[in-house]
Amino acid sequence: MANKMTPRERVAATIGGKKPDKLPIMVANSNTFICQYYGISVEDFLTKPDLCAQGNIKFIEEFEVDYCLTVNGYILYGCGPELRVTWEFVENNFPGFVEVPIKSEWILL
């Protein structure tokens, strides 16, 4: 059996086509879980980068995640004016867009 790898080594081995010591765990889009599990309000998560970082680090360490795609929502949701996108909070959930620059209907075939 191979020696225990660090998360960085495990992901690098996998990307390099080598066999890791175990299957790497990758998580994406964990924002809602982090807020609910650690009792962080969505507003604080989106407007306080240090709190967002602390929640993500805690999550990665507690659940032994090897690779976590951390999307900092305060950057995404803050870019509305220049892109003509308007975001709106619904209760204690992450914002959804309510105004977009393209107003035409999509045709699905």
Image: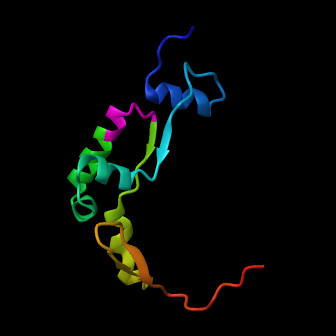
- Quadrant where the C terminus sits is bottom right
Q: Tell whether 8 sits left or right of 102.
A: left
- The answer to whether residue 80 is magenta is no
Residue visible at 33% across and 49% down in the picture: 34
Q: How many marks?
A: 0
**Which of the 4 image quarters holds residue 82?**
bottom left
**Residue at the outermost bottom position:** 104
**Which of the 4 image quarters holds residue 59?**
top left
The one of 48 and 36 positioned closer to us in this rendering: 36
Range covered by the magenta-colored residues: 59-66
Query: Where residue 12 sits in the image (x, y, percent)?
Result: 54, 30
- Quadrant where the N terminus sits is top right
Q: Tell whether 108 sits left or right of 53.
A: right
Residue visible at 41% across and 74% down in the picture: 96
The colour mode here is: rainbow
Query: Where residue 16 sits in the image (x, y, percent)?
Result: 62, 30
Residue visible at 40% across and 56% down in the picture: 71
- The answer to whether residue 61 is magenta is yes
